[in-house]
Image (cartoon, helix red, strand yellow):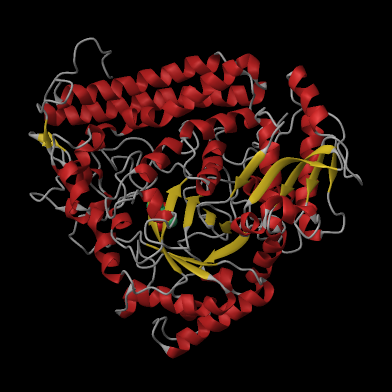
Amino acid sequence: LAEDGYRLWLRYNTVHDPALLQQYRQQITSILSPGDADGLFRAQQELITGLSGLLGKQISMQMGVNNGTVMVGLPQHFSFIRTLVGDTALARLGEEGFIIRTTRRDGKSVILITGNKEAGILYGVFHFLRLLQTHQPIQQLNISSTPKIQLRLLNHWDNLNRTVERGYAGGSIWDWQRLPGYIDQRYIDYARANASIGINGTVLTNVNANAMVLTEAWLQKVAALANVFRQYHLKVYLTARFSAPVEIGKLKTADPLNAEVKQWWKEKANEIYRSIPDFGGFLVKANSEGQPGPQNYQRTHADGANMLADAVAPHGGIVMWRAFVYSNESPEDRFKQAYNDFKPLDGQFRKNVLVQVKNGPIDFQPREPFHPLFGAMPQTPLMMEFQLTQEYMGFATHLVYQAPLFKEVLNADTHSKSSSTVAQIIDGTANNHTLTGMAGVANIGSDINWTGHPFGQANWYTLGRLAWDNSLTSAQIANEWIRQTFSNKKAFVDTVQQLMLASREIMVNYMTPLGLHHIMGYGHHYGPAPWYNKAPRADWNPVYFHKADSIGIGFDRTASGSNALAQYQPAVRQQFENMATCPEYFLLWFHHVPWDHKMRSGKTLWETMCDKYYSGVDSVRWMQRSWNRMQNFIDAERFNQVRQLLAIQEQEAVWWRNACLLYFQTFSRKAIPAGYEKPD
Ligand code: GCW
């Protein structure tokens, strides 16, 4: 029973609807695929396991075609594919695209799964299985799919001692101590899960990096993981500590323009590629929160990134250089610092560098406006960094489905060109970049169900699906995840989908409504602490962000304040700087608003803030009631886990509401509107 969470969305339980099961059994009878094609082995295995489970009978590889044979192969395996599909259509699939098509062979109706390359076939197989898992009709399939984004990555913030920075689901799944000799089944299932949603790369180590991972003994362990992951087309990347040449290379400096330093990194790259020929490259956090970087030597981020890029370029590697930088010495609004550092460097990066930008300018808050850099560096491939681990969203305790947050950012219009939503910036279409990427800071740990909260799995799932196809809606992704993970029964799917779709806004309401941000507990970031002002740096203090006083609350980022709004294109700036047009959910991000300010509803700011906090709590209770009706649809184990977690979430929503309202009330000096239960 304890395995229910372990299997994620790859359960393959027998289709429970008898009519549909009978239909599928007629439509799928056997598999035809070359037995000697090593590169197809994992896809074939998955198809056998998946189909046998879903159809409740053994489906195996057989010679010859029957009605219902699933043919799986490359054009070189089945000569008819080229004629059927056409060279242009095949070429358009690239390395990773696939085609699934119902067609006829020798007078029989068959289903063809093909691609240009093995990776495409693997993705095609998983897609086909998903159709069955979600009870879709399969009689006339004609699907062609290619990923919109090239690098679809997880970023693990895993340390070499198996702690995980901001990880809430146990320790790291990388058992470094027993690597390279011991290959845990988890690594294989991890790779399967990623491949099933199109994730094709994983950064194994924390961006607050430890240089030791670049030493020989550790690289052997990394190579052992890469050997497993390669079978699922999952590339391995590492974080590079900028001071590694000093720390493990015994050099006197890590200055990126120093010849010895350059040489050291070249040799290090050569060494890595000797044992991991398809190594993906480096992710770097530099000159941020105490990490070393090129600015220690009066060099720029471009100097640093380019030096590493040159080292991996001969091997086809890339560098992902993070834009999450801000300095405690700077008096500047923290919102503005990344833009100030990076915008002037546009056009100065090597071809194999991406700048990796967090979705918002501060730090993965429940709601942030999109990062102004997305509209400001047309010559540089910008990669999206989302955070799956819920650092500011109730850890692995609160149920928060993040797709609506991701979509809100992706759909935002940067107005830097005529077609330039954030999605179009990062998928390369706005500025004609072919190197594109989207990363999610992983929420995965050693917990048996991988993500601690059973619904945390949905956020991992979302990252993969959205990176493959950013036009999918939050509802579509939730719907298919629920069907695969729990049940296809309509009452269950409808209820849980509604609950998931509402969950993010509910969390915003009980934590940080109306554009409040960064008012959580110091250091650990859990729970409310809007009063806190003792951090060693001003820009870590909640009071720095909400600026509540007797007049009002909020951070003035217009021209009369920090003027951070000047970093957006004029159309965006104008919308946000005018209180009348600024969306109310961003209001306190950009304005210091009087407590009596009339909102669009006619209520005052204070009354509206009370409404939001109270409705946030009420909505968690609604989530509880909805979930309680689901008891008979799923296993007791996961039902009870979610039930207990929702009970904690309810208590903590009350905690947030009471703490924030009672504290802000000391400034507003206004009563909680009548009709609400009193905070205690
Ligand atoms: O979100 C903040 C976290 C840090 C993290 C940092 C970053 C890895 O509080 O723990 O460090 O951002 O993204 O670099």
Q: Position of residue 452 (x, y in %)?
A: 56, 37
User: Is 290 placed left or right of 49 in the picture?
Assistant: left
Say whether residue 483 is visible: yes
Q: Position of residue 301 (x, y in %)?
A: 35, 72
Q: Quadrant of ligand 1?
A: bottom left
Q: Quadrant of residue 373?
A: bottom left
User: Is 10 placed left or right of 407 in the picture?
Assistant: right
Q: Position of residue 576 (x, y in %)?
A: 19, 42
Q: Quadrant of residue 657?
A: top left
Q: Quadrant of residue 302?
A: bottom left
Q: Nearer the viewer, residue 233 or 595?
A: 233
Q: Residue furthest top?
A: 675
Q: Position of residue 281 (x, y in %)?
A: 54, 68
User: Is 398 placed left or right of 674 in the picture?
Assistant: right
- 677 in relation to 451, above or below: above
Say whether residue 394 is visible: no
Residue located 27% across and 61% down the image? 339
Q: Nearer the viewer, residue 305 or 289?
A: 305
Quarter of the image with the N terminus in it: top right
Quarter of the image with the C terminus in it: top left
Residue located 27% across and 50% down the image? 415
Residue located 67% across and 77% down the image? 274
User: Is 50 placed left or right of 487 in the picture?
Assistant: right
- 281 in relation to 168, above or below: below
The tally of labels here is 0
Residue located 63% across and 31% down the image? 485
Q: Residue furthest right?
A: 63
Q: Nearer the viewer, residue 330 or 121?
A: 121
